[in-house]
Amino acid sequence: MGYIEDERSAVLDFFPEFRSSIDDAAKFDITIKHILTQTSGIRWRELDIAYKSSANMHYGMEHSSDWMEFVLSQPMEHCPGEVFEYNTGAFHLFSAIIERASGMKFEDFADKHLFTPLGIEEIEWKRDPCGFACAAGSVGGVSLTPMDLAKIGWMVIDGGEFNGRRIVDTDWLDRSTVGLVDTLHGAHYGYGWWVWHADGIKIFAAKGYAGQALMIVPELDLFVVFTGNNIAKKKRYDAVFKKILSAIES
C-alpha cells in the first residue's frame, strides 16, 4: 500500500503542529517501531495503577481535551528503544499517523483493509475528544463480537489469509509476533503482541481491558478468544489456557 515507508519513520514527522513546542530532542527520535513495541521512552504509569485513579496516566489522558497533545507533552524518562513501558497513549498516536499517512479516517482504513475482507460488520469504536478512533484497547478501543475476534485469529493462523484472500503480509506477521522487548510481566513484547512460551511452545496474544484476549499458538494451529469482564481472573485465564494446551497435546 505504501502509505508509510516503514516502522522506522519518526513519529513527530506526522505531528508538525507539535514540533515547535517539543522541549526534549529525544522525542524527535521516537519512531513508529518504538510505539509498536511500547518503548517510546515517554514517562508513563498505567498497568500497575488502577485505571480509575487520577495517578494513572491513562486517566489523565482521558480527562484531557486533546489526547495527542497530552501524550506528546509528557517528559521523556528513557531514550527511545531502551525500556518497555506500557503506554496506551503512545499507541493511540498511531490512529492519527494512519489518518495522516493514508488520507483516510482510521476506522475507514481498518474497515477497508481488515474488517470488510474478514466479513466483520458489528464494530464499535471509542473516540477521543478530537474525534480520533482509539487505536489502543486498554480501556476502550474497538469492541468486537467473540466470533469476529476469532476471524482475526483464524486469519493470523492462516499466515495472513482469510477464505483464500491475502489480508496481511506474511512477513509483517512474522516480524510483528517476535518477542523483541523484555517486559516486567513475564512475557516479551512484539509489535502490539505479548509473546511468551509455555512448555516450549510459542504463544502470542492481543490482550485487551479486563482480561479479554486473542491468544494464538501457531505450532498447534490453535487460537482462543476470551471475552467478558475477566478483570478479577486475569491470571486465571493463563492457567485455563495451559489446560487447553495439555488437552490438545494428549
Image: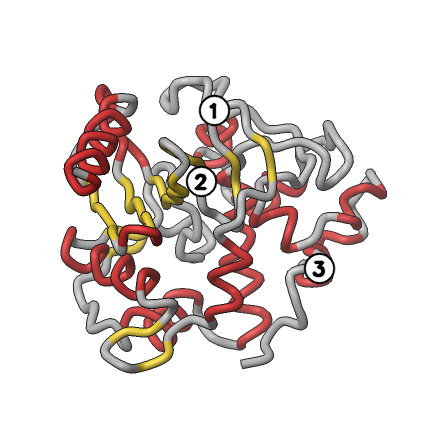
For label 3, the SS is loop
User: Is disc 3 surrounded by few (<14), some (14 to 19) or many (20+) residues within 10 Å?
Assistant: few
Between disc 3 and disc 1, the foreground one is 1
Q: Amino acid at mark 3?
A: Arg
Q: Position of residue 107 (x, y in %)?
A: 37, 66
Instruction: Name the residue rendered at 17%, 42% in the picture.
Output: 248
Q: State the separation of the CA atoms marked 3 and 1.
A: 26 Å
Question: Circle 1 sits in a helix, a strand or a loop, which is it?
Answer: loop
Residue under label 3? 8
Q: Is residue 53 left or right of residue 189?
A: left
Residue 194's tag is 2
Q: Is residue 135 above or below residue 53?
A: below
Dots 2 and 1: beta carbons under 8 Å? yes
Identity of the residue furthest to the front in this view: 250
- Chosen colour scheme: secondary structure
Q: Which mark is residue 185?
A: 1
What percent of the width, then of the height, locates residue 40? Answer: 66, 41
Q: Give the distance between the C-alpha atoms of the residues marked 3 and 2, in whole angstroms.
A: 21 Å
Q: Point out the tag, 3 or 2, that comes first from the N-terminus.
A: 3
Of the numbered discs 2 and 1, the one sitting upstream in the chain is: 1
Q: Position of residue 201 (x, y in %)?
A: 38, 40
Helix, strand or loop at disc 2? Answer: strand
